[in-house]
Image: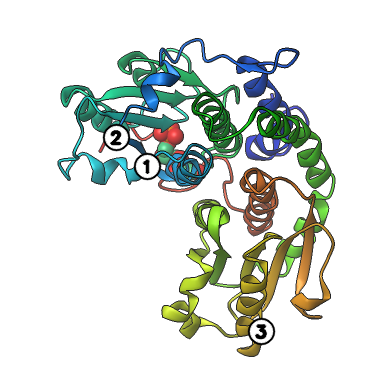
Amino acid sequence: EKAGYKHFMQKEIFEQPRAIVDTLRSVLDVNREVLRFSDLNLDASLVHKLRKVFLVACGTSYHACLVGKYLLEGLCRIPVEVDLASEFRYRKPLLDDQSLLIVVSQSGETADTRAALKEGLERGAHCRAIVNVVGSSLARMAHGVLYTHAGPEIGVASTKAFTTQVVAFYLLALHWARTSGTISDPEFSEHLRELLALPRKLEEVLDRADVLRDWAREFLKVEHFLYLGRGILYPIALEGALKLKEISYIHAEGYAAGEMKHGPIALIDENMPVVVLAQKGELYEKMLSNVQEVRARGGRVLAIVEGEQDPRLGESTWQFPVPETSPWLAPVVFSIPLQLLAYHVADLRGTDVDQPRNLAKSVTVE
Ligand code: M6R
């Protein structure tokens, strides 16, 4: 059932173009350029009357929520708060019938996320779930569901569930932005074109997976990794670090690159590889100076760079180019090399990639 792959995780990484196509197809009528969320049970006009949207989840699904905040606030101009489910339920959240709570989960069974949803239901909020498993607890408890169509995810480390969650948020954001007029019809069509081009771009990255295996070979003995991202890629730095630590058991931290000077720079030396997510655009120059700061302290920089390789990243910097995309979809494109890097480091270290120690696929106890 691994279809020739060594691990489920590897298979699931390679399934992402297909998973994204299926998620798109489930809501998009391509010919008419219409998005339909048949199980969501939520009138877009209601969304614009609400005071706030709360996005709540655990682990990787929480990282998808962090990206979701950028998408919903950026495209729809709706205020969004993001919480870890295990914190949300204990902080007496200010939820009422003016709030929309969206819980996000691959399994639909995570205990803390279920408790967060229960909290929302009891406080009279509008409650929806973005879930991968049909008929799961969260899908049944919420007032409506947006299903990701990742298919069964067996590896404990979440990959295709994550990227389809990001796509689900993007689809919601586009729909609400179009109905409220924060994006024009031509802009909407342009966003759809970018989305439809995404699976092909992911194939391009997957075709070069071997490069990341070569990178991985160099880092089997290191004890720490740092991941830096900015803007919409900050959550991807967090996600990249989580992927590495859970399957390779190497300590890794994700940081907003602008925070480096406020602490983590003290850790940098030749034994601390730093993975930098270099998205082209308004924050690119800032990222170049972060790279300088790391290199000046003897740190090794591994850059995932959008478009062409860039000599300004420095001669000693290893560069993995990824196809250019709309800034809103960069989180999906940049996730793939980080998943592959984590996978190959773990595989080469000989860990149990699909069933890492101490972890369960679905955390149904608190
Ligand atoms: O099934 P869920 O999405 O609710 O699971 C949440 C987390 O337990 C999960 O994402 C976990 O962090 C993964 N092992 C990360 O790869």
Point out the image quarter for the N terminus.
top right
* Residue sitting at x 42%, y 79%: 262
Tell me which colouring the rendered structure shows. rainbow
Q: Position of residue 196 (x, y in %)?
A: 75, 29
* Disc 3/disc 2 C-alpha distance (Å): 45 Å
Residue type, mark 2 in image: Arg
Q: Position of residue 334 (x, y in %)?
A: 67, 51
Ligand 1's quadrant is top left
Residue type, mark 3 in image: Arg
How many numbered marks, from 0 up?
3
The answer to whether the beta carbon of the residue marked 2 is less than 8 Å from any atom of ligand 1 is no
- Is the residue 120 above or below the residue 144 in the image? below
* Residue sitting at x 29%, y 28%: 114
Q: Secondary structure at mark 3?
A: helix
* Disc 1/disc 2 C-alpha distance (Å): 7 Å
Left or right of 265, for residue 29: right
Left or right of 206, for residue 170: left
Q: Position of residue 52 (x, y in %)?
A: 31, 36
Q: State the mark number for residue 295.
A: 3
Residue named by callout 1: 79
Nearest the viewer among 80 and 150 is 80
Left or right of 338, for residue 175: left
Q: Secondary structure at mark 2?
A: loop
Left or right of 259, for residue 203: right
Residue type, mark 1 in image: Pro
**Lower position in the chain sequence, tag 1 or tag 3:** 1
* Disc 1/disc 3 C-alpha distance (Å): 38 Å
Q: Are marks 1 and 3 in contact (CB under 8 Å)?
A: no
**Lower position in the chain sequence, tag 3 or tag 2:** 2
* Residue sitting at x 66%, y 83%: 292
Q: Secondary structure at mark 1?
A: loop
Q: Position of residue 127 (x, y in %)?
A: 31, 23
